[in-house]
Amino acid sequence: MIGLAAVGAVVVGSAAHGAFHRNSPVFGSVLAKLPTTGNVVSLTFDDGPNPDATPKILDALKEKNVKATFFILGRHAERWPDLVLRIAHEGHQIGNHGYFHRKLHFKRPFYVRQDIKLGKRAIERTGAPAPAWFRAPHGFRNPWVTSIAGSMGERVAGWSLGVWDTDRPGVAEIVKRTIAGTKPGSIILLHDGDGYDPEGDRMQTAEAVPLII
């Protein structure tokens, strides 16, 4: 019984790690960092577009000739398709962040498929290229997220540095956390939008970006 209990604890622990840790390989392959030791990082933004923050971020990236990846929410893409197109036209990569921004770890396969599919469709309807990457809201996954995303031509991305800019700790603090935590190959997570409020305030992040890059 002790042995069986120990095995059960390992199984439950592995499942929890797979569901709640953004980079866990338990539920399938996920890109956690760039395969490089050079002075290269990936700057990524979730939950947009946003009518105030996204244009300001794009202006800063354009001025410094920096490219980023934007993980777009489908329902926000429908509200601001011109911003999605601007992101694409300015040479940034567009990823799929689903449609609803609901945590997927306890969702059934049908729901997962619909969320990813609707997000992908909303992006494509703007005229932007089909996304090649999917990032789950909050990084939460389950045993079928990776395979369903893969069936739609999308690999799963995680991140190696999150700075909790959604808490709006102040521009200086966002800059400090980002610079302090960045290493070669880091995938940096910032937010140009709010997953729960289409017009949520992300101006601290927008103002931090020029100081980070």
Image (cartoon, helix red, strand yellow):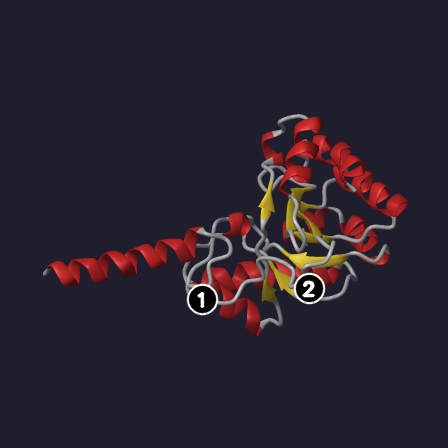
The residue at the point 71 percent across, 35 percent down is: 205
| Disc 1 residue crowd, few under 14, some 14–19, many 20+, Cα 10 Å | some
Question: In the rendered view, would you say 169 is above or below 103?
Answer: above
Instruction: Answer whether residue 212 is visible to the viewer in this image.
Output: yes
The residue at the point 66 percent across, 28 percent down is: 173
Query: Which amino acid, mark 1?
Result: Trp
Q: Quadrant of the C terminus?
A: top right
Rendering coords of residue 117 (x, y %): 59, 64
Question: Is 52 on the left-hand or right-hand side of 153?
Answer: right
User: Along the line of sight, which residue is nearer the eye, 160 or 194?
Assistant: 160
| Residue 171 found in image quarter | top right
Q: Identify the residue at the far front of this view.
A: 37
SS category of the residue bearing label 1: loop
Mark closer to the chain start, 1 or 2:
2
The residue at the point 46 percent across, 58 percent down is: 24
| Residue 127 found in image quarter | bottom right
Rendering coords of residue 60 (x, y %): 84, 41
The residue at the point 54 percent across, 55 percent down is: 136
Q: Which residue is mark 1?
A: 144
- Give the Cα separation between the discs numbered 1 and 2: 19 Å
User: Along the line of sight, which residue is nearer the eye, 178 or 8?
Assistant: 178
Q: Quadrant of the N terminus?
A: bottom left
Question: Is 126 on the left-hand or right-hand side of 32?
Answer: right
Instruction: Answer whether residue 198 is visible to the viewer in this image.
Output: no
Rendering coords of residue 102 (x, y %): 50, 48
Q: Identify the residue at the far right of this view.
A: 63
Q: Which mark is residue 131?
A: 2
Query: Which amino acid, mark 2?
Result: Pro
